């Protein structure tokens, strides 16, 4: 099977590789249509590792995928050949302690696409457990289906936040994940979201959505902006999506008394937090690790039109140009939010 | 001061009546612009009582109001003369046990506009505590401001439901409150709402909103519809807004395992509930009594454009025609959702 | 394998029956030491069915069990031969939608010991999934281990109640489950529990525990008692464990504003509930269906001495006298809370 | 009125001072019986300030008090002369935004005993709002009543933790507050608490309670201890009560997946937190600021015998020896947990 293979740090090939051929009784076989490129894919390409996960063997990249069911295992009942689907890339041990509790995202045994040593999905066909494969309604395109994975992180953040209808949100950082969080927060009940970043092009993209106010940190102070927007009370929920030490230190001051701080950004090292400031407002802090039980919710919101992710798809390249696509992703053009690869084109 | 006075059951007058003239230090004086007519106002008119609340003395009607601040008490700091505002009609004892807990809506000492023996606000000027008076942003009209009160009940239902982003809601009953609940549920994070009623005109009005699916109970079975819409899983949240015994009995079957049932409708007498059916799905049931701490949230959602209540204002009549407005409300025309009275016109 | 078999309604045999002999890779084989008799076992004996579950083939009874691991499947790591254990009797489909959400108790595919057509555990050896088999600390006896199952229902009720430290609880009904609920509520953070029943012997048993106040409904009115005990405010949590229509109707009046009502008792038919009364206090109502993820918590509380279930074990009979034990259970002696059968004696 | 007055940093007098003499309509006058010495009282004595709160005028110390009602304001109904009571020392603005929400502890307008410029209660009589004055049951002594204030912080921590029955808790730091937290956690539903400190005398005191396991950090590693005590899973709730940077950095590793971290200790400056470690377990972090709505709960638990604070009262000195008592408190003897002053003795 042809696949985009990360041979080692810095070297990609589009070549044939042996992958599983037959679904087990609870699996489906899927013809991949579209795969999005995630920052983690790019990071494995440029650095060969993320934290403890090191690429030691050639590994197929890609974990944001949508496609068509072309075969179903013998025990699969809720999916049929021809179904248009997207896939949750992390597969936990179904009988682990975390899975029993419903928090399968924190199961240490999770096997996750394109996380060494597990192959990803940038290949024309994959085998996947049916229970982590979700049908797309007719009005949701494959391209949108491949956006469900990054949006799921925004959904997890919105769920953990326990948004109350009419909340005012702050989102620190307008990278792809910050944008996903802002849209999930709005769809999830916030009245509006104040999004900050130093990049004007990014702020222009997310600022084009209804309900978003942007603050360019190169020109304005976030605390002043939030205070003005909330009559001095502060935001109900602050989503920290930048991972930047200064943003993390200042985040508590943006929240209202009794408010919530959601840590989405992942600073590599420990960073100083102002605990007394958090206590003075008696904040609750939530953390986010991937997602669990949100794919159906995400698809519901996209299908109903409450969330439109299409403006965030910056370009779509054919499978044959996968390496070029990754090299463009490495550039980190300010106006690129999400690059996608249309895999089905090579068939 | 001129006012719409319910003299006794069945008899209204538009006449002068003595009302408080000066705000206390924590109060504001407000020139009333618009007042909506609520079913409870109509019920006092037609029945002279609601449960234990009996009209024994002439009482000014009306509790859904917006207007302009024309005087502020000496301690008021967050409001100024000229502010456009709407008012929360129930005033609790600020030092009661319920108030201390933040659930002032269930304070037995609440004094509520147009609930005997407390006068309402269908009069050109009222005195009101500043802390229950909320500024309207420029983009929210007085007519919308007067809709905040009924919408607040929808907000309270949505809050109590603890909606998770992407939930599917069911709303049983498309009366004014059912409509408010459906809109609050959508704004509050639901992906879509399935609204049922026997009245086609009502379903047409609410069905015109994005995200609403309607089920006419004269033609279709709700359980079948919900099952079809949710792949047989059931709705995450069922809002019971009809108060009808049959709807209440059948409501648990519409919910998914682990789902939520919110009791908004108020059946006069105890009604049978299928407890074993609720247990089999391990449902949580929430009840709603008026609202607390939701006005600012409601205004946020209206101001941001996430909720549009204007289509629910069926007609606006001048203060001089208040009695005619009430008589029209008594008719309960199927296409009338909310009638409003423009009080400022008489000045 | 010898077993206590319900041949059909009203007829028990202690006889040999074919049961699975070898554990699968994720299973363990357990030598059963003690089994408690549950009201449901007795109901199958006397009525041949419970709701839709009808005994059509001979079925081994018993689902409250503790014993010793005597063989482990090849993939089992957290248990070893010789471990003293108790077992959760309901086995869900690990890849069902409910299981993914962590609410495996409401998985419709659950297979539950001694629920037709699934055999129970009143037999010297059983095969059971390791993930639903829990090690008992040294200080917890087999007899206590066999009490974990009924106590787990109390734990589930206490969990669903979301008890806040220092809450005052009411428990309506002092049957075995009401007693378990009262003890779980106290261990779970309640300061005290007011338990009502018509049976003086039952009230004497539960009233001997610290923190329990009893109300004999033959002599006293519960609403008066609760009001007196709470300065007129009402109880924070009302656990309805009687299943009696009158108790269910009156339960809301026992709760404080903003309080919680937990429906544990299972009335066969729909019963009238006073919805307006629940709304006036804005109660939350929780329902309970078996339990999920509580066994380890229950064992923790028993092991630490916070819960002492030994006084509720009224008598222990040898396996050879199982039929006599069931016949005594049918008598429902007021002073019998839990009868247990010591299975290991027959070895 | 005689009082213990902090004249300035480092200088105490027991002398007469003018204090309010008459209760307002919602107040009571209380004869003070016992007052505990808090670390904050001592800190004002030794440093003259705590953060932004600077002693600029002579100030009466003390905020942990119990006494007897000797006069009631005209509107007070729930208290009577002769009632034995304890008092919540922080009085919020009842009509502030935070108070309306029920989180009056984070009201910036709170006036708190012995927090400059507000006088404390180390004086024979005080005037206090009745709504923050709580009756003590007969079985609760004045000495215990004066312990309710520090215990209330433990209660707030236990409430914010949202303890589930049977949770395993970790408490980092065995100072007075750490001890209060450990006892509140146990009473609030935890099965057991693992308490760490470097001080053997402190660990001996708290380790004498049932359900407490102690870890002396001078000899043992906390992560090893917690892992051993929880089969490698981690604690459900970690209460950080030390304020020490190393403890804060290591705290996430002590928690189980999906667990909770409660920040009680107050490090003066920002300290590094390991956000990725928190995310890997998807921890929730709660912060604590004083307390709200917990006094009645605390009294309930003490009255029912679930919490025994008497062993934590290390010595009781007469009012006349107040200065000596403070000087002993300054010494910070390892075996002194709480020193109390019996004020009534001087009358």
Image (cartoon, coloured by chain):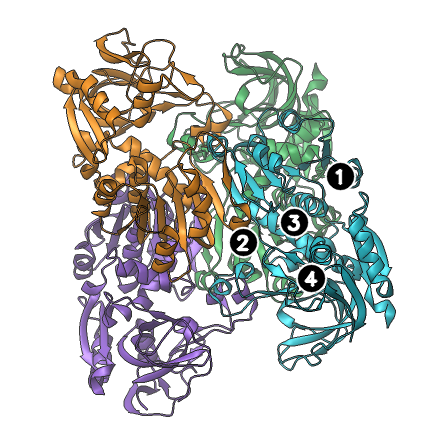
Chain colours: A orange, B purple, C green, D cyan
From what the image shows, is residue A97 above or below residue A258?
Answer: above
Q: Residue A280 has which mark?
A: 2
CA–CA distance in space, label 4 to label 3: 40 Å
Q: Which mark is residue A155?
A: none
Share a chain, discs 2 and 4? no
Considering depth in this image, is C154 or D322 the residue closer to the camera? D322
Q: Label for residue D154?
A: 3
Which residue: 66% across, 27% down? Answer: D229
Q: Secondary structure at mark 4?
A: loop
- Residue position for label 1: D210
Q: Residue A339, located in which quarter of the rendered image?
A: top left
Q: Residues within 10 Å of mark 3 (few under 14, many from 20)?
A: many
Label 3: element kind: helix
The quarter in which the N terminus of chain C is drawn is: top right
Q: Quadrant of the C terminus of chain C?
A: top right
Instruction: Please determine whether, in this image, residue C241 is positioned above or below residue B308.
Output: above
Residue C59, given in percent of the width and then of the height, sits at 52, 23
Is D147 situated left or right of B25 in this image? Answer: right
Mark 2 belongs to which subunit? A
From the image, state whether disc 1 or disc 3 is nearer to you: 3
Label 1 – label 3 distance at C-alpha: 17 Å
* Residue nearer the viewer, D245 or D27: D245
Foreground residue, B167 or D28? Answer: D28
For label 2, the SS is helix
Going from N to C along the chain, the mark reached first, 1 or 3, is: 3
Q: Are marks 2 and 3 on the same chain?
A: no
């Amino acid at each position: 099977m042809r696949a985009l293979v990360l041979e080692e740090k810095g070297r990609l090939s589009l070549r044939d590789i042996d992958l599983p051929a037959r679904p087990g009784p609870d699996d489906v076989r899927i013809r991949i249509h579209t795969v999005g490129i995630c920052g983690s894919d790019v990071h494995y390409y440029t650095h060969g590792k993320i934290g403890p996960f090191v690429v030691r063997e050639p590994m197929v990249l890609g974990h944001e995928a949508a496609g068509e069911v072309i075969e179903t295992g013998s025990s699969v009942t809720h999916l049929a050949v021809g179904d248009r689907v997207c896939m949750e890339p992390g597969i936990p041990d179904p009988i682990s302690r975390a899975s029993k509790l419903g928090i399968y995202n924190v199961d240490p045994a999770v096997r996750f696409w394109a996380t060494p040593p597990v192959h990803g999905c940038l290949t024309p066909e994959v085998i996947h457990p049916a229970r982590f494969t979700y049908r797309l309604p007719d009005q949701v395109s494959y391209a949108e289906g491949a956006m469900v994975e990054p949006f799921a992180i925004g959904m997890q953040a919105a769920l953990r936040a326990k948004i109350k209808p009419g909340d005012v949100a702050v989102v620190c950082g307008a990278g792809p994940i910050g944008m996903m969080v802002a849209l999930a927060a709005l769809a999830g009940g916030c009245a509006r979201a104040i999004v900050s970043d130093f990049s004007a092009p990014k702020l222009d993209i997310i600022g084009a959505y209804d309900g978003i106010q942007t603050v360019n940190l190169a020109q304005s102070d976030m605390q002043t902006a939030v205070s003005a927007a909330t009559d001095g009370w502060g935001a109900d929920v602050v989503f920290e999506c930048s991972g930047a030490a200064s943003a993390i230190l200042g985040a508590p001051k943006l929240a209202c008394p009794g408010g919530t701080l959601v840590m989405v950004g992942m600073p590599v090292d420990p960073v100083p937090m102002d605990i007394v400031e958090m206590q003075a407002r008696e904040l609750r802090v939530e953390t986010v690790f991937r997602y669990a039980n949100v794919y159906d919710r995400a698809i519901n919101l996209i299908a109903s039109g409450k969330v439109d992710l299409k403006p965030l798809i910056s370009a779509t390249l054919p499978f044959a140009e996968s390496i070029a696509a990754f090299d463009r992703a490495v550039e980190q053009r300010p106006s690129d939010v999400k690059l996608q690869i249309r895999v089905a084109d090579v068939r």
